Amino acid sequence: MKIRSADRPRAKEKEYHAAPDTVSGMVLRAQSGFYWVQTGAGMVECKLRGRLKRERQNTDIAVIGDDVAITIIDTGKGAIEAVLPRRSRLARKAAGSRGVGIEDVIVANLNQVLLIFACAQPAFTPRMLDRYLVICEHSELAPIIVATKVDLVSTDEAHAMLAPYERVGYRVIYASTQSGQGIDEVRQSLAGRISVVTGKSGVGKSSLLNAVVPELNLATRTVSAHLGGKGRHTTTVAELLPLSLEGGGYVADTPGIREIGLWNLPPEDLDGCFRELRPFLGECYYTGCTHIHEPACAVRAALAAGQIDPARYDSYVRLRAGEQ
Ligand SMILES: Nc1nc2c(ncn2[C@@H]2O[C@H](COP(=O)(O)OP(=O)(O)O)[C@@H](O)[C@H]2O)c(=O)[nH]1
Ligand SMILES: [Mg+2]
Ligand SMILES: [Zn+2]
């Protein structure tokens, strides 16, 4: 019985997808029960079939980035009949109705996450970058670090800040909307992909995207407005913006993935989310070693030998202790 009921929605999705009266598309915007779906024949404003709401209860029914099959009801109006299986997701925990944690998906089917950090104004925050990287590693999402406002510091300073990340294999793009440095590189990395751009307010996300694709014409805020804003985020609707680049591409400019937290990350999996610790895992004397106080710990030996960056190790220890 269980197997059959689990199979049913999947069979239906296939059936609907193949049905001659459905059109396939991707959700670019979702707000108050309405979904803007981009299809080969233009944008269609859709509602959800009631049946879908009953079938999918442990996850969001449809979110931006979802591939969907829709039926056209009227000119520019339609109904989402099926949501295809997600290839990837950026999700956070939401309180379920019966106290069960349910998945609150922010973006589906994304290819990469651009982690935007300013070299200055606001100051570079390595601890926050480490948290974001753990989230990416755990969600199996490819991160690209973009160090913005490099014009405000010397090249040496910028490289010194990001060197620990480059050393362990993360890609870092050094960018400035003032000098134009790195803009082509960001453009190439966004072309043809679905990307989430995240980072705290004021780091230059909107300015960067405008420099990459001027047609986006995103609102940017002045530093004084930012400082006077008491840290409040302007509430914006999550939206995938089509990029007028060769090969297309979409980007969601989100204020931050800070609120995602490490909710579904078992503490014992944290070490594997730090790339540079991986070669040493399994080499410790104790199975289940936390790499904090145990004797004969391969991770701490590597730290003492200078093979692991002390600041990155410190982030590991803090996160392992439950710091959010
Ligand atoms: N010096 C310098 N300032 C920048 C750069 N990029 C953005 N800014 C400034 O940083 C502030 C915040 O930019 P904004 O794009 O609104 O940041 P967002 O909140 O992350 O979208 C604005 O005053 C921008 O002019 C840069 O590369 N260099
Ligand atoms: Mg912005
Ligand atoms: Zn250990």
Image (cartoon, helix red, strand yellow):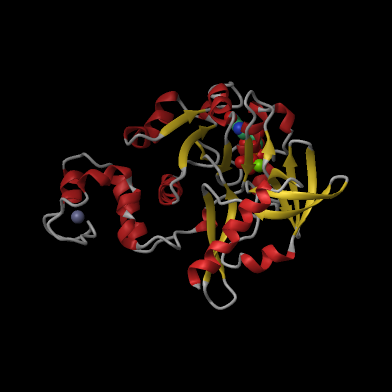
Q: Residue 83: horizontal and vertical position, in percent?
A: 64, 53
Q: Nearer the viewer, residue 103 or 92?
A: 103
Which quadrant of the figure contains the C terminus?
A: bottom left
Q: Is residue 212 visible?
A: yes
Image point 77% across, 50% down: which residue? 71
Q: Nearer the viewer, residue 24 or 155?
A: 24
In the picture, measured across the screen, residue 199 lies left or right of residue 43, that is left
In the picture, measured across the screen, residue 158 lies left or right of residue 237, that is left
Compared with residue 101, is residue 104 higher up or lower down, i.e. above or below?
A: above
Q: Residue 316: horizontal and vertical position, in percent?
A: 32, 53
Compared with residue 79, is residue 166 higher up or lower down, i.e. above or below?
A: above
In the picture, measured across the screen, residue 160 lies left or right of residue 182, that is left
Q: Is residue 230 visible?
A: no
Image point 54% across, 62% down: which residue? 7
In the picture, measured across the screen, residue 61 lies left or right of residue 319, that is right
Image point 33% across, 47% down: which residue? 274
Image point 35% across, 50% down: which residue? 273
Q: Nearer the viewer, residue 48 or 205?
A: 48
Q: Which quadrant of the figure shows ligand 3?
A: bottom left
Q: Residue 271: horizontal and vertical position, in percent?
A: 30, 53
Residue 206 picture quarter = top right
Residue at the far right in the pictured view:
75
Residue at the far bottom in the pictured view:
98
Q: Residue 8: horizontal and vertical position, in percent?
A: 58, 63
Q: Nearer the viewer, residue 251 or 232?
A: 251
Number of marks in picture: 0
